[in-house]
Image: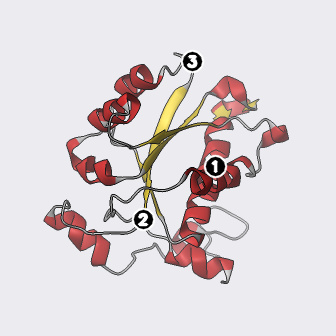
Amino acid sequence: MDLLQEIELRRARRGLSGEALDEATMHRLLTAATLAPSCFNHQPWRMIAVENAAGNPAAEALAAALTAGNAWARKAAWFVVCCTAPHLDCRLDEGRDYSYFDLGQAAFALQMQAQHEGLIAHPMAGFSPSKVRMALSIPADIVPLAVLAIGKPGSTELLNEGQIQKETAPRDRKPLEEVAFRNTYGQSF
């Protein structure tokens, strides 16, 4: 498949099957993340993979840390908590802490591998960082920035009406000329 087409088809879907994913699949997804580029090859990402299996206290605590709007994610087969900290990467002038950019690249690589394998990898910001930090023993100087809900596509039965509409609506992207410029800021590409 053409990479641009695969990127275009990627959606942050919420309808998960609840079906388990094997460890080999998660290994491929995490490997894709580790292959992302980073400033001076610092690789500042730290990813905590949590299997959402019955009796796993880490998964139960992580699910409890999600906001009510992310209740659908409790059907994920795995959660990946994406963490970093400014001191792990290049700290440049004018507050350009590169660790967040590099973590985003790693998370996107994981999402693209998931897309390639026909899986959902939905990034979420709706969680309590302090609860996640406590549940997974994340050091105080490490920032849990996002949680990815990963699983096979499935039913939308746990979604509210607004979420179902987002699942089925045409993909809405800003036009290129609004976000990409030529030579100077504001001059459309």
**Horizontal and vertical percent position of residue 55:** 33, 34
Left or right relative to 135: residue 143: right
**Horizontal and vertical percent position of residue 115:** 54, 69
Task: Look at 40% across and 28% down and name the residue there.
Answer: 132
Could you say whether the residue bearing mark 1 is in a helix, strand or loop? helix
- Please name the residue that numbered disc 1 is placed on: 30
Q: How far is mark 1 from mark 3, CA to CA?
A: 22 Å
| Residue type of the residue flagged with mark 2 | Lys
Tell me where residue 51 sits by quadrant: top left
Query: Foreground: 84 or 53?
Result: 53
Mark 3 near mark 2, Cβ–Cβ under 8 Å?
no
Q: Is residue 74 visible?
A: yes
**Horizontal and vertical percent position of residue 131:** 35, 24
Tell me where residue 1 sits by quadrant: bottom right
- Please name the residue that numbered disc 2 is placed on: 152
Q: Earlier in the sequence, mark 1 or mark 3?
A: 1
- Please name the residue that numbered disc 3 is placed on: 141
Residue extending farthest right: 40
Q: Is residue 148 visible?
A: no
Q: How far is mark 2 from mark 1, CA to CA?
A: 16 Å
